[in-house]
Image: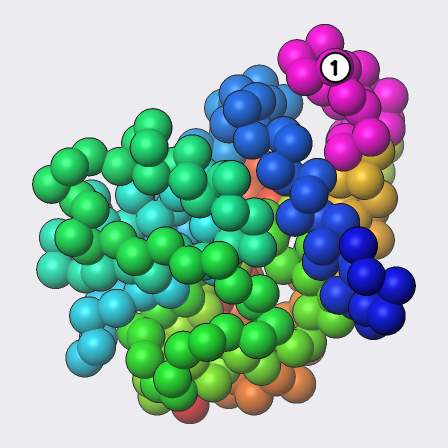
Amino acid sequence: MSDDLRPEDRHTQDVSEMFGKMTPWYDLQNRVFSLFLDCWWRRCLVRSVVPGPTGNVIDMAAGTLDVTLSVIRRFPQLKVCATDICEPMLRYGEERKLRPNERARVTTMVADARRMPLPDGCADAITMAFGIRNVRPREEALREMHRLLVPGGRACILEFAPVSFPVFGRLYHWYLRHVMPKLAGLVSGSTNAYDYFADTIENFPAPEQFSEELREAGFKFVTYRPMTLGVANIHIAIRG
């Protein structure tokens, strides 16, 4: 690892390496730790996509392609550019999940959400599931989303957040800190990643604050929908 990296770039590299090591167990852990709710949350995210003039969707932080595949299967007319900083996750999704007749509609690209090698206004929608809290500084990725969308295009972001409900919130955060890392150790033999996940969830802004960040990035219409008592939220931001 180069010593002359900016702290933000070093963080990006560290996150990529961490996810790369988790790849074989990533989908299983998501299902088990969320009680399979993550599948429903992603379906709801994809329902927020609205096709437009380009026929293209960008799936940022695409991981093992769960959202990408949901988009092309729900919208037969759309193509998806699936991007992620972690190449092993993209390759895993291509090899294990992508059907032969779907390959022409999916392009994978190793790319940083802060600096996307794509032209302005090239997508009708951008999806991002559980990725934005890993980006530093995230305002750079939000501005990139705004740049890449056509006027009227929408960024659809699914992300965890601290839970504010008094009793449920305490139980949930206790689960994050004390139960989830132990389960991760049983599945993958490593708890470090899930200590990191708990930190990023607890330090992510409340939905109202994140909505303001989206407005500061240039989006004119911003809303959000809480999922499962606010454990996750779907944020919709439309470019004016």
Q: Amino acid at mark 1?
A: Gly
Q: How is the image coloured?
A: rainbow
- Mark 1 falls on what kind of element? loop
Q: Position of residue 215 (x, y in %)?
A: 61, 82
Disc 1: CA contacts within 10 A as few (<14), some (14-19) or many (>=20): few
Residue corresponding to mark 1: 189
Identify which residue is drawn at 32% across, 75% down: 123
- Quadrant where the C terminus sits is bottom left
Please indicate, yes or no, whether residue 68 appears anywhere in the rendered image. Answer: yes
Identify which residue is drawn at 30% across, 57% down: 107
Q: Position of residue 46 (x, y in %)?
A: 35, 51
Left or right placement of residue 79 versus residue 116 in this view? left
Identify which residue is drawn at 19% across, 61% down: 78
Residue 155 vertical placement versus 226 (above, below): below
Left or right placement of residue 44 versus residue 162 in this view? left
Foreground residue among 28 and 167: 28
State the extent of the magenta-drawn residues as a range: 172-194
Residue 142 vertical placement versus 20 (above, below): below
